[in-house]
Image (tube, rainbow, N blue to C red):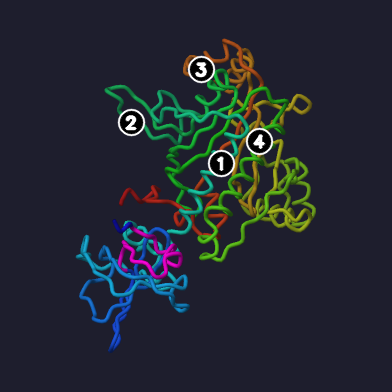
């Protein structure tokens, strides 16, 4: 029985009869010969025919023929004399020519026609990189003794605040789409000690920018028995190293196609305290952000350049953000209670990860909620976990689409998002 061979594997079958299946990527008819370029999940293969065929591009074909060496063909081999079977004929052309090396369409056209547009090799490449990154994230945390979990995405209370949540009708009761798995992953530290999750989160933030989405994929982790936030930072560094190693191993062709370098994750990512970062910015930029509770995007970009220049690193930890800008469950710095044991990780000057140490004592949660005027009754299910004893713990969350966009140099996070959901888009 003749088995299917992928396009990338044709050179290993020179002289044999094989079956090739895929989409008709491009057709070129000359006087005495016709060439078909067939695309499958592994790449492109050239097929040589003596007579032209009438099939439009994107028709799905199955071809059985002999593999012949040809240095000018993709991979150095081509299929000749094929018997062709049409598995499915394209009845509409794609929104633009998928065979052209560059993408001859603006982002709205790509997004409107995503099921066909994403077949373009350059548009597909970021998602191959993202898939490899997720595999590396899982492998790294599995190796550190983490357990993968799956938590609810319909919740009875907002995770971080009452604003910026999508409300839904849950059988006549109010409910929300989860902003993060934060409460659940903390509770599960009491079960497994170390947990992670890969799943969607939802933010009803009316931002119409190149970096915000209403739904994105979050790579979350939480670990118990930490000394402070630095243990969390060390685990995050391991996760990122695993992601980059997996991309190098599994998505090298996608990186090469996009022409993007894979930055090294340093053995020790440089770190700077929030107040020191503000001092640097004030000293060198002519702007004075001191007294502000957060960093502006322009200041993050400046710090990214500083980290590259001074430390040779594409990554920079900014630690010790003010407590007023962190969620109520964040652990304060015992020596400077107005600052937190938290961090942001900047990647090429853009906030990629937020994390830190959490409160773990029941009484501390009651005090933190009271100081913010929050009703503990609204968090009864969450607080119950801490009534039964929880170890010191902390965690982080990586936005997959933002990481992919930053890694590939995409100008807009939607270029690294499958079927994005934002302020204006609810389809396809």
Residue 375 picture location, percent across and down: 51, 17
Residue 186 picture location, percent across and down: 55, 24
Q: Do the residues labelled 2 and 1 touch (CB within 8 Å)?
A: no
* N-terminal label among 2 and 4: 2
Residue 225 picture location, percent across and down: 67, 22
| Element type at mark 4 | helix
- Which disc number belongs to residue 137? 1
Report how far apart the C-alphas of labels 4 and 3 lie in the structure.
Answer: 33 Å
Task: Please rate how many residues cluster around mark 4, counting C-alpha atoms within 10 Å: few if below 14, some from 14 to 19, many from 20.
Answer: some
Which circle, 2 or 1, is nearer the viewer?
1
- Tell me the residue at 58%/30% (across/down): 146
Report how far apart the C-alphas of labels 4 and 1 lie in the structure.
Answer: 11 Å
* N-terminal label among 2 and 1: 1
Report the span colored magenta: 4-24
Report how far apart the C-alphas of labels 2 and 4 lie in the structure.
Answer: 35 Å
Residue 407 picture location, percent across and down: 57, 55
Report how far apart the C-alphas of labels 2 and 3 lie in the structure.
Answer: 22 Å
Which circle, 2 or 3, is nearer the viewer?
2
- Tell me the residue at 30%/69% (across/down): 65
- Which disc number belongs to residue 375? 3
The verdict on residue 10 being magenta is yes
| As drawn, 94 above or below 164 | below
**Residue that numbered label 2 is attached to:** 168
73 sits left or right of 329 in the view: left
**Residue that numbered label 4 is attached to:** 235
109 sits left or right of 246 in the view: left
| Element type at mark 3 | loop
- Which residue reaches farthest bottom? 31
């Amino acid at each position: 029985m003749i088995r299917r061979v992928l396009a990338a594997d044709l050179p290993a079958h020179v002289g044999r009869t094989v079956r090739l299946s895929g989409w008709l990527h491009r057709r070129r008819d000359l006087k005495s010969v016709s060439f078909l370029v067939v695309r499958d999940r592994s790449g492109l293969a050239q097929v040589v025919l003596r007579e032209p065929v009438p099939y439009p591009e994107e028709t799905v074909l199955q071809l059985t023929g002999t593999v012949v060496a040809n240095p000018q063909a993709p991979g150095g081999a081509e299929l000749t004399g094929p018997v062709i079977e049409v598995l499915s004929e394209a009845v509409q052309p794609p929104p633009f020519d998928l065979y052209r090396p560059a993408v001859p369409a603006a982002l709205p056209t790509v997004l409107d026609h995503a099921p066909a547009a994403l077949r373009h090799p350059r548009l597909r490449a970021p998602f191959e990189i993202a898939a490899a990154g997720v595999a590396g994230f899982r492998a790294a945390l599995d190796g550190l003794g983490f357990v993968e979990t799956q938590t609810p995405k319909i919740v009875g209370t907002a995770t971080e605040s009452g604003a910026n949540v999508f409300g839904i009708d849950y059988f006549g009761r109010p409910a929300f789409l989860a902003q993060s798995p934060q409460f659940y992953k903390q509770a599960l530290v009491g079960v497994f000690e170390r947990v992670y999750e890969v799943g969607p989160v939802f933010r009803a933030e009316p931002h119409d920018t190149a970096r915000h989405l209403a739904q994105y994929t979050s790579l979350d982790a939480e670990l118990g028995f930490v000394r402070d936030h630095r243990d969390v930072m060390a685990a995050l560094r391991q996760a990122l190293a695993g992601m980059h190693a997996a991309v190098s191993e599994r998505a090298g062709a996608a990186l090469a196609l996009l022409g993007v370098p894979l930055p090294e994750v340093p053995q020790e990512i440089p770190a700077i305290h929030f107040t020191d970062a503000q001092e640097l910015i004030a000293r060198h930029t002519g702007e004075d952000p001191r007294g502000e509770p957060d960093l502006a995007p322009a200041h993050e970009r400046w710090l990214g350049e500083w980290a590259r220049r001074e430390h040779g690193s594409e990554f920079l930890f900014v630690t010790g953000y003010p407590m007023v800008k962190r969620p109520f469950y964040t652990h304060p710095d015992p020596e400077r209670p107005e600052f937190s044991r938290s961090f942001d990780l900047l990647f090429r000057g853009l906030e990629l990860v937020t994390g830190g140490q959490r409160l773990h004592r029941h009484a501390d949660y009651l005090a933190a909620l009271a100081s913010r005027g929050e009703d503990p009754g609204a968090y009864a299910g969450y607080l119950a976990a801490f009534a039964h004893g929880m170890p010191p713990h902390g965690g982080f969350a990586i936005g997959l689409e933002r990481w992919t966009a930053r890694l590939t140099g995409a100008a807009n996070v939607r270029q690294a998002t499958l079927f994005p959901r934002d302020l204006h888009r609810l389809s396809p």
